[in-house]
Every structure is written in structure tokens, then in C-alpha cells.
Image: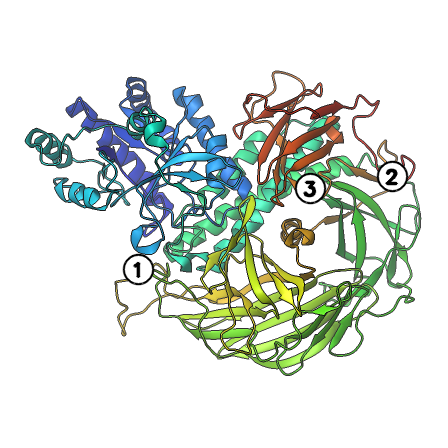
Amino acid sequence: MIGATHIDPVWLWPWQEGYQEARATFRSALDRMDEYPDFVFTCDQVVLLSWVEESDPEMFERIRERVREGRWVNAGGWWVEPDCNMPMGESFVRHGLYGQRFLESRFGRRATVGMNVDPFGHNVMLPQILRGHGLDTYMFLRPGPHESDFRDTLFWWEAPDGSRVLAYRIPFEYCSPPGPVDHQTEKSLQAMGSDLDSAMVLFGVGNHGGGPTKANIDSIHRFDRMGSFGRMRIASPREYFDDLLARGDDFLGTLPVRSDDLQHHASGCYSAHSGIKAWQKRAQFAVLSAERWAAVAERLGGRPYPRAGLENAWKQVLFNQFHDTLPGSAIETAYDDARDQLGEATAIAKRIIVRAHNEIARRVNIPFDDATQPVLVFNPHPWPVTQTVPFQFGAQRGGVHVVDADGSPVPAQETQSVATTNDQSRGAIAFRAEVPAFGYRLYRLAPGRVPTSAPDVVRSDTVLENEHLRVEVDPGTGWVSSLLDKATGMDLVAGTGAEPHTVICEDPTDTWGHRVVSYAWPGSPMETVSMRVRERGALRGVLRVERRWGSSTMIEEFVLEAGATTLRVDVELDWREQAHVMKVRVPVALDAPRARYEIPMGSMERPVDGAEEPVQGWVDLSGEHEGKPAGLTVVLTNKNGVDVSPATTPDGVPSIGITATRSPVYSWHDPRTLDPEGIYRYQDQGVQQFGYALAPHAGRWQDVGATRRAAELGRPVRAMAESFHQGDLPPEMSFADDGAGRVMVTAVKGAEDEPAGGLSDVVVRAVEIAGEDGEATIEVPFAGVSITRRFTPHQIRTFRISASGDVTDVDLLEGPVPSDEEPGEETTVEHAEAEIHATGEDEA
């Protein structure tokens, strides 16, 4: 019998109410310990402990005493119980990093049991992440047997890299009524697997807190004496799991193994409340970039690593990944708080980034040239990036063109200024920046308009074309009627014009989308009301399509850049419909299609069956086109709900459907019915922005590099104006480079431990993203090392680099792990005169 409480810090109430409830519930749990010597209380969600520590230090000390006794048990080890599908992979790492560090620093011990009782599904990379946090077991509730394809209560859950945790699906509920526990126990025993002779039954009032009651505990004692359900003992999850593990291989070897997601529950949450999805994505990218640049700034200039600021920012991000916030199922006012908190995280990150960039910029040698304006472009990604950079300028009535540090011309074209004034010296330009991996490059704005020698990307009012792609947009439908990949000669869109691009229909489902399997429903398309060329030039072409349905409008701008192998689509949706859903569909002319979705720190294949699925940054559909291997990857930003649907007619084609918006009533939970005369507030009213890109390929999804493309789409390079000055840094540099191959660096940061003196250790984390085995090299010149390691498919590895250049393999908590290096692996420490490796032409 597990005495616990589930506290939703935000749900049908604001976080301020959850803050108080944590204190009230914990006081009740402590009082029960005073009254019942055998009572053990299990607590998860570390944020609740942090709130009590800051608001009631005396109570927190009582908790510490009970932890020392072993009667207050901290499980879970994560900052909150987050949604387990939509956060980025690094966010899951940070839940354990900040949660376990808090537990260790306050109580001298970490959690060992993973506990996420209420989230609406669990991605399959979690077993590897849990093991990296020191958690060998996992208990959860959803999905249950009525909504999933597995019936087991106890099983091994295995990640794609082979990592396993012993998982326990709570048979009935994670909280109970305040009275006797007989109903809770009966239902649990009825629902558990028949092959088990023991069970964990959770008791205690929950959701809005409360915890175990006297009536709960008295009834356990009474039913235990009576033998009503066998023996009943109040214990901790650790005791239960240890009892099972002690049975050895004869028992453990018979347990089923699941190597898949734990899905599905509340599929509507992948798309509910577009705002929180966009704010979260922006904040996560911003904080990840900030810690990278802060680590460089410390090594380059000695500025102390801003741990406190970054921790504050991360905790705002993590808190708003709670499983009723990020999924969109909380009350409307909760999102006012979420917007403010995630805005705080983003603002902290931006200040750190700007400060670091300026500290680097002031050291770049920029010779005086009064005819030009220096511009530094910074790339936050640990691989080289080529992007079109928009830049606003002033004091140039005759316009500008762009050159690099050597004076060579750079592809550019004039664009519309954001300043609508009579100041004729204000203007805007877009230019092609090729920036080294996690580094910067110097450009200059020179007087005089951009020369027009290269061919225009816009071939006609309906056709965009470069050396790789030819794109034709139908003026009637406003959708792509041809997407010719010149490398393969294949056009995966031709002939799909009968399939609608936008589909809108009524959505009678509740906020969560309870019992929804698919939103791939028939409906009506938006009406195309205009199409025109927005931009034309040798650098890029932009076709602007405007659509309308009811009171709503949508603008899609199709952007093809010179040299690009993808077609980007920037979307602005002004949604005014209530209780409706809209899909943006991409029909693809493929036979025998297979679908692959990006998940946090990995990817997985799922059926082509129209089911609504969670996705990180891309979904791929591969198969055959006219007998040849082919595929199309759709790269996304700010959207997490996607279906891949089979052809619905004999002459139809499969399609990828992005759930652009749903507009249910806030926090409407079926089976509650809506009053026809009631007054309700509906989600997603107003303007939102998102984007996607179409990347055709010859059949191997790995060749697209979609995970990197999604990161670039979500976090573009940053350009800043600079002045002239002498410096010791060259016009371009790289600080870290993962080689842009099958192993991708996901984090570069300062270690969480404060240095005893001198510089912080640097932590670098990377993950294998192609599902292939092999060796990879990560260059970290700003820390003076080159790291070569073998990565197995989907493996996450973390390295800690000391100030002297020693490299240690560490776990996700940044502590040492036993070395499992194989022959041939090596770490090279480059003791160069300058620790930073320059990539300018002089160095080459």
C-alpha cells in the first residue's frame, strides 16, 4: 500500500493555488506520521519540495528528519511530472539533472524509482534517460488496457539502445477517495496481471492534493487483520521493486519486454493550445543556445558561467512542461502565467547570448573601413549552417550590398524594411551566410545596391526554381502541384492535386481528445483568395498564398532559396472558429509507404493508419515512386500533432497531415456535456505562426538530416552589427563541431558544479540519430579537445572536459560512469598555443 498524493501544481487552478496546496498536503502527511508509526509517505515532483523549502523552512526540516528515518520517500527524481512526448530530449535530461541534484543536496540521497503517474503517454527513449538519472524502475498509469495494445502490469521497458527499466503500470488509479481503501484495492487487484502475486496499490486523496487520510490508514490496518485482500503493508515503491528484483532471473526472465512507446492517451493534447507549444519551443532553443555561448564566454574571456540565471530559466521551462500545462488541458488563466514564465526564461537566455556575443565580437579583429558596416553572424548549432539572414540597416540612402571579410561579394537581395517611416536611409537586405559550426563569421555591408547577375529564382508567377528543385504552385488550389527533385528526376507531388491541402471540420471532442484515435476526418478546404509573388531575386523567391474559411484566414509563403534542397513554407493563421479542427495536408505520391517520426532524442517507425501521433520536429514518408525508392520528409516547428494516412480511394495517395489548430473549450473534460446556453472560452482564437519544409529524397530518411534541419528552422543564426576595432580573433571561428553526421551534439554547457577556482568543466552531450553503429569524432576546440567515441544506435553519451583538457565519460547527472571504451577510441587533447581553433583562410 503506497501512501502518496498526486498534486497537479497547475490544472483547474493556477500555480499559486498549487503552491499553497503543496504545503498543506505535506503538513497532513507529516501529521499522519506522528499518529501512525508504520505510515510511509511517497513524494514525487521536486518542485513541490522546493516550494515548501522556500515558504516553510520549519516544515522542510521536519521532512528532512522523516527522510533520514526512511518514512518520507522521494521518488520520481524529476522537477515535475512532465508531458512525456512533446518536450525536447534535453528537457528530459534537465528534469533529472535539477531534480536529483536538489534531492541529493537537501537529503543526501537521490531517487531510484521513476514515478510519472499522470502523463498521457511516454516516449520510448525514456528508459535510456531514466537509467542515466540513476532510476532503474518506472511506475505510471496511462495508457490503460482500454486504450492500448498491452495488458501487462509488470514488464521490462526497453529503449532503442537496449537500456531497460522494470516498469509497473498502476492497475487502477494513482489516488483514492478519503474513506476506506476497499474499493481502490478491489479494482486494483481485478485490473492487475494474473501472473503476479503482489501489487502496489496507491492511496491518498490527490489531484488537488490532500494525501492519505486517517480513514485510509485505519482501513488498511483493519483489512490486513481480516485478511480481506491477503496481507496489506504500507511501504514504498522501492521496497516493492526490490522484492521483485530479489527473485532473480527465474522470475525476471519471464517478464514481457516492450520496446515501443507507451501510447496513446488524450491524443488531442498534441495540438491543444498552439500558444504553449510555440512558447515552449522558443524557450527551450533559447536556453540551450545561452548555455553554449556562456560556456564559450567563460573559456574565452574568463566571465563566470551564469549558473543561477540558467537554472532559473531552465526551471521555468521545466515547470511549464507539466502534463496539464504543455498539453493544453489547464484553465485559460494558467496560460497567462505560462506565457510570462516562459517569457522570463527566454529573456534570461537572450541577455546571456547577447552579452556573450558582444564579448566575442569585441575581440574580433575588424580593420577600419568607413565605407562599410561590419556584421557578425553567430551560429548556435554544432555543425556548419548556411542560411539566408534578414538584416535591417540605416544611414544608407543608396542601398547596400554584402561582402565577406575578404571583400568578395555575397549573394543578397533587397527586402521590405520593418520600419514604415519617411526615413529613406532605413532599409532591409537578406544575404546568404555560411557560418562554421557553433561559431561566427564576419560580413560587411557595402554602399550600393545588390548587383543582379545570377538568374532569378522566380521563373513565373507560379514557378520557383533553383539548381535542385522546381516548384509549381496551382493558382486555383494555392498548393504545390509539382515538386521536382532534379537529383532523382522524381516528382512526389505531381498528380496529387485532387487531394485537399487544407481540411476543416467540426471537432466535437473535449480538450484532451479523450478516446480520439484520429483527426484525419473529411472536411472542407479553405478557399484560395489570392496568390502573388512576394519576393523575387537571385537569392530567393517567395510566393504568397492567402486563404479564407468562415471568419478565419491563412497566409502561406512558399520560400525557395538558391542552392536549397528543401521548400520552406512560412504560415500565419488567424483562426476565429470555435470547436473546429484544421489539418494542413501534404499528399505524397508513394506506393508501399512507411512512416517515421522524430521523438525526443530519437526516431521511430509507426503505422500508416491515420492515427494522431506526437512528433518532435519532423515526420518522413518513404516508399516507392514508379518502382524506385523515394521519400518526402516534412520538417516542422511549433506543431506536435501529426497523422500519416493511407490513400482513402483506389486512385488516391497517402498523405502527411499536420494538425494546425484545434479550438475546443478550455479544460472541458468529457463526459461533462456543454450547456447549449453556457458561455465558454475557446482555445486558439487569434493569430499564430508556424512553419514547415518539404524535403524530397531518394528513399533514405537519414540522408535528409531532418533533425538538424528542424533545429535550424526552430533556432536560426543571429546577426549583429559591430564596430571597427583591433582584436586577437580572426574573421571566422568554430568553437565545437560534431561533423554533421550520424552523431549530433545536443548540449554544450558548463558543468553544474561550481569550480573550486579557475574555469568550469565543460559538458558535451551527443546522441546517435541515424540508427547506425559506428565511430564519431566531436571537435571541441574552445575546450582544447577532440573526442572520438563509438556510438551504438540511438545511444546518448555525455562527456566532461576539465580545464586541463581531461575528458571523462559521465552520466546524465554529470557524474562519472564506468568506462566502457572499446579499442580504438581515443581522446585527443590539443595543446595549441591558442585554445580556440580558428577556421579563417589564414589558418587553413
Which quadrant of the structure image shows residue 477? bottom right
Vertical arrangement, residue 665 with respect to residue 737, above or below: below
**If you read the primary sequence from the N terminus, does the residue marked by circle 2 or circle 1 appear first?**
1
Q: Are circles 1 and 3 on residues that touch, CB within 8 Å?
A: no
The numbered disc on residue 354 is: 3
The residue type indicated by label 1 comes to: His
Q: Which percent across, then down, holds residue 366?
A: 88, 40
Tell me: 376 left or right of 692: right
The numbered disc on residue 21 is: none
Which quadrant of the structure image shows residue 662? bottom left
Using a 10 Å C-alpha cutoff, classify the residue at mark 3 as few (fewer than 14 neighbours), some (14 to 19) or many (20 or more). Answer: some
**If you read the primary sequence from the N terminus, does the residue marked by circle 1 or circle 3 appear first?**
3
Residue highlighted by disc 2? 840
Vertical arrangement, residue 594 with respect to residue 209, above or below: below
The residue type indicated by label 2 comes to: Gly
* Helix, strand or loop status at disc 2: loop
Tell me: 264 left or right of 216: right
The residue type indicated by label 3 comes to: Val
Q: How far apart are marks 2 and 1 (CA)?
A: 59 Å
